[in-house]
Image: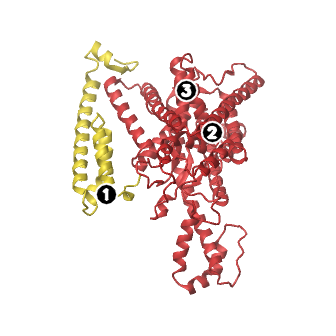
Amino acid sequence: MSDTGSDSEASATEHTALMDGHIAEARPDREIAERIARKRKSKSESQRNYGSVERREESGQGDNRDPGPSSSNPGVQMETQVEELELKYGARHVIKLFVPVTLCMLVVVATISSINFYSVKDVYLAYTPFHEESPYAVTKVWNALANSMILLSVIALMTVLLIVLYKKRCYKIIHGWLILSSLMLLFLFSYLYIEEALRAYNIPMDYITLVFVMWNFGVMGMIVIHWKGPLRMQQAYLIFIAALMALVFIKYLPEWTTWAVLAVISIWDLVAVLTPKGPLRILVETAQERNEPIFPALIYSSTVMYCMAAPGVAVGSAGGSGAPVQGAQAAGGENRGGGGGTEGDGEGGFDAAWRARGGSPRRLRVDSTAPAHYTTRLDRPRPPPPPPTDAEDEKGVKLGLGDFIFYSVLVGKASSYGDWNTTLACFVAILIGLCLTLLLLAIFKKALPALPISITFGLIFYFATRCVVKPFADALAAEQVFI
Amino acid sequence: MDLNRLPNDKKLQLCRWYFKVGCILLPFVWAVNAVWFFKEAFIKPPFEEQKQIKKYVLMSAGGAAVWACSLAAWVSVFQTRRVTWGAIGDSLSFIVPLGQA
């Protein structure tokens, strides 16, 4: 963590990155950029001098960069090169995150379109006692708001609980909770999913094949998420888990509540991450004080994270099924037990998931899943220095799984009304929001909440498209303006 | 998990662990093991542990292939003979299709 002296507090190393928030770089671009800039520098003096003017122009960072025009000042030279490289790397990261986010949304939209089960409202969670059954819009609105407030308070409570556990170093509890969550998500929810998929397509299936397939799928998922496995497989499982959780939310939340919850969670995310007393910020700061990286169990990472020279420490790439799993637990309990006896478990799971997701998803989720890795890490007084070899591999972008989940909830809910215009509009809006968030991350270099911008754009686009564009397009089609 | 970062003995350890885990009715783990370590075992220039990794990769691939064949055989038998098995077929079925036998 003592790599870049000047902005060590602001820069995100792989030890602080997760702690620092929803979207953070595994290693600071600055380091890499500086290293490369240094290599360039050593090429030739004259080249550097000649190139100075054009490089200054190219560096679009827009900071208080003050280029002395004819100065052959190597410091300024390197600075501008560094900025340029940082932006270049930043752009690559944006693309690296587009694919998984798009995949997750695709899975959710495909499932909602083809499997009726997830659009049908029969059972609700205990967290949403107001079921919006009245025909009056006003009643529905206050129902939705009340439900979202209840959920938010549950989330806030769980966040505080998590902070308390973390501060008291009860890593085993958090660890166990995470494992349990992953198990539930990978086995129970996948089983429900496969059952509904088979039923929708009317495909006969026997118990033997089913058990065998589920066993293989689940165990492989546990290994790859919580321990070591090929990166692509890990990413694929995380995307699938996020999609499963999103489907659970879409199914078990009443209509208007879903939208209210999205809005409320974005605001909570913003508050929890950016305000000085925000729970997530407290978590990150605590982790920083203790010099521990928050384990990215619930974080999707675009590259492999080598936060180890620590033997036996699971690699922290795209870990994370904690939060979603917990949510799944809740939903699963509700579904199976009819909300009766299993409510307790379900709620706990749901809360955790919710909180993790809602409150600065990255952090909370990281926390929930972190323990697994934390416990091993604690054995070492100091986290080992990052391996000196090619830092480029390590430098990936991390996005919390909760972000994936909420993005997919938004797009999935939009698609459940059957209009493709709306679905595509929401999809584009979320990607734009993600780009902007990553841009801000490149500029500010600290933990940022990934939800607010994207969800705001998504909601605006959704309501605008549904209320304005759709009737317009329908009228155009009816009048045959476009043939 | 990037295999390139690992020292060779750790690679062997990982390959061996995956193989052992696959023995508990987990051909998927074997298949992943075979694919993941294929490059290490056959394409990379020879290193000390490569022979053993090769052995594990081949055994994993073989095991996965055997399981895949038997699973395919069972599924095809079940799907085609399910109806003729009557009561047993029904008790084995997790999903019975609607609107057809």
Question: Which chain is yellow in the rendering?
Answer: B
Apparent colour of chain A: red
Q: At label 2, which amino acid type do we have? A: Ile
In the image, what residue occupies the spot 25% across and 44% down?
B60
Q: Can you identify the residue that label 1 sits on?
A: B8
Dot 1: within a 10 Å radius of its alpha carbon, few (fewer than 14), some, or many (20 or more) residues? some
Q: At label 1, which amino acid type do we have? A: Asn
Q: Can you identify the residue that label 3 sits on?
A: A331
Dot 2: within a 10 Å radius of its alpha carbon, few (fewer than 14), some, or many (20 or more) residues? many
Observer-nearest residue: A282 or A432? A282
Q: Earlier in the sequence, mark 2 or mark 3?
A: 2
State the separation of the CA atoms marked 2 and 3.
24 Å
**Residue B63 in view:** yes
Mark 2 and mark 1, same subunit?
Answer: no
Q: Where is residue A468 in the image (x, y as percent from the top left)?
A: 72, 40
Q: Can you identify the residue that label 2 sits on?
A: A163
Q: At label 3, which amino acid type do we have? A: Ala
Dot 3: within a 10 Å radius of its alpha carbon, few (fewer than 14), some, or many (20 or more) residues? many
Q: Which chain carries label 3?
A: A
Q: Is residue A306 left or right of residue B43?
A: right
Mark 3 and mark 1, same subunit?
Answer: no
